[in-house]
Amino acid sequence: MATFKNTLIQINQIAMDRGDEQLGVTLITNYLKLINEESERPKFVALYNSGVSLECNGSPIIPIFNEMEQKDVNVIACTTCLKHFNLLNEQQVGIAGTMMDIIDLQKVADKVISL
């Protein structure tokens, strides 16, 4: 049986895939909502590049990330990326971490999914 146990989901942009950004935001919102409804969720979600904005003021994903954290999913955003986009003080959920933290998560994860 397939499982998300010890899975790291990496998100490196504000929207899922390329193309229409509004559609991409809808897709990533739906994806994370459905993942959150699974009986077994991923262990970690790592955000970098413009993906860090998904955990900051104004993001429609914040309530989903809040629920995921209550269900023991760790959300971590790249500090360098937060600084680059002037979002370091805009985080509403998750923690800021280093690229080394993300690399360490990649090392221990049984599976890595990049969006």
Image (cartoon, rainbow, N blue to C red):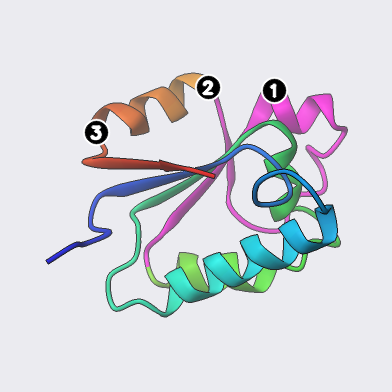
* Residue for badge 2: 99
Q: Amino acid at mark 3?
A: Val
Asked which quadrant contains residue 97, the reply is top right
Locate the C terminus by quadrant. top right
Q: Is residue 64 above or below residue 97?
A: below
Q: Position of residue 113 (x, y in %)?
A: 41, 44
Mark 3 and mark 2: Cα distance apart in space: 15 Å
Sooner in the amino-acid sequence: mark 3 or mark 2? 2
Neighbor class of circle 3 (other Cα within 10 Å; few <14, some 14-19, many 20+) is few
Q: Which residue occupies the extreme front position in the image? A: 19
Residue in the picture at 27% in, 59% down: 4
* SS under mark 2: helix
Q: Is residue 69 magenta?
A: no
Quick one: 3 or 18, which is closer to the camera?
18
- Residue 77 highlighted magenta (yes or no): yes
Q: Which quarter of the rendering shows the N terminus?
A: bottom left
Give the mark nearer the N terminus: 1 vs 3: 1
Residue stretch rendered in magenta on the structure: 72-98
12 vs 31, left or right, is right
Q: Position of residue 100 (x, y in %)?
A: 45, 19
Instruction: Identify the residue position indicated by label 1 in the image.
Output: 80
Answer with the quarter of the image where residue 18 lies.
top right
Q: Amino acid at mark 2?
A: Met
Residue type beneath disc 1 = Thr
Q: Residues within 10 Å of mark 1 (few under 14, many from 20)?
A: some
Return the residue at label 3: 108
State if disc 2 and disc 1 touch (CB < 8 Å).
Answer: yes
Rendered position, 99 above or below 95: above
